[in-house]
Amino acid sequence: MKRWTIRDVAKVAGVSPATVSRVLNDNPSVAPELARRVHDAVRTLEGGRTPKRIAVVLPRRLEAYEPDPMGGSFYGPVITGMHQVFQEAGHDLTLLPYSPDQGAEAVLRVERDRSDALILIGADASEELALEAQRRGMPVVVIDRLVRGVDSVISDNFGGAEEITAHVLRQEYRRLAFVSESFSDPSFAARRKGFERAIARSGLEGLDVRQYELGFAWSAAAAVVEELCRALEPPFAIVAGNDMTALHILGILKAKNLSIPDQVGLAGFDDIAQASLVDPPLTTVRVDKVEMGRLAARRVLERMEVGDLLPITITMHVALMERASTALRRSRQQG
């Protein structure tokens, strides 16, 4: 139950009661600065303090993979990390679905009045939105994508992919394929380069190496697996751009009654919760997703305190998680 009236808010904000009424009814005619003063006044009256509101911008495209972002396989833990930091600091976190066709202007017109900072999540996070929000003076951090000139928190995509590919080669797979939804996605592009670097540095001769784009929601995955089975003699290995892709392919391989890792080795990236629970457990690269969220949240708090900080990029180390899906050498030794 609220303990204030429109006149109370008007007095604290230094505006007219009519202005308060328009703001509380989301009337777009109120100037952004006046609207912010009204919202701050309400927060002050409700709690004796002024908590900040941070909007976490999620591309609507993610709904194809994580219908419930709060419980999602990758971004759920990231959001959990952010929530921990903001809750401790007494601030509020809200989710803001975003589609590029909305345009940065439309989003910022609303969020300028409602939010004190933005965190953009996803490798396909809007660079336009990040840069425009920063130009308007809003603290901005991007997670899982490098946007030059904007604070960014990313994982070591290149190094992680190089390490896991080198591991696959050590397991004596000599026919390999790198697969991901898109090679233009910045994270997948870096992982693809890491895959290529490991191949080049291996010094091995006679390797059969292939690369495939699977398309949005892995539309070409079944056809690619079929082609690999026709073209490559077992054993061969598939290095996927992320765990979600690897798990999708795992289902296709099982439906074809292929033995993993004896006929096909399979590796992913991210170490989502499901990766260790499937049969066989998935070899992957661990990204500390909760800490990724915490780092982004702490940087936002710094930005809100000191507005003229130079942008930074935080690159998180990753770790190889060796599991049964690529254990070809052990399988041969036991056989």
Image (cartoon, helix red, strand yellow):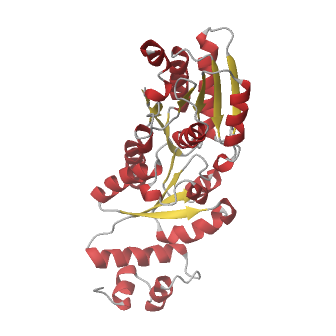
The quadrant where residue 8 appears: bottom left
The answer to whether residue 135 is visible is: no
Query: Residue at left 42%, top 56%?
Result: 71
Which residue is the extreme one toward the left? 48
Query: Residue at left 66%, top 59%?
Result: 100
* Viewport quadrant of the N terminus: bottom left
In the image, 179 versus 225, the foreground residue is 225
Position of residue 176 relative to residue 73, above or below, is above
The quadrant where residue 330 appears: top left
Position of residue 121 relative to residue 331, above or below, is below
Can you give x and y, in whole percent of width and height, for residue 29 in the image?
59, 82
In the image, 255 versus 6, the foreground residue is 255
Query: Residue at left 46%, top 19%?
Result: 331
Can you give x and y, in whole percent of width and height, for residue 280 in the image?
45, 33
Number of numbered markers: 0
In the image, 315 versus 131, the foreground residue is 315
Can you give x and y, in whole percent of width and height, for residue 157 in the image?
54, 32
The answer to whether residue 197 is visible is: yes
Can you give x and y, in whole percent of width and height, for residue 222 in the image?
68, 42
In the image, 128 versus 274, the foreground residue is 274
Query: Residue at left 67%, top 14%?
Result: 207
Position of residue 224 relative to residue 81, above or below, is above
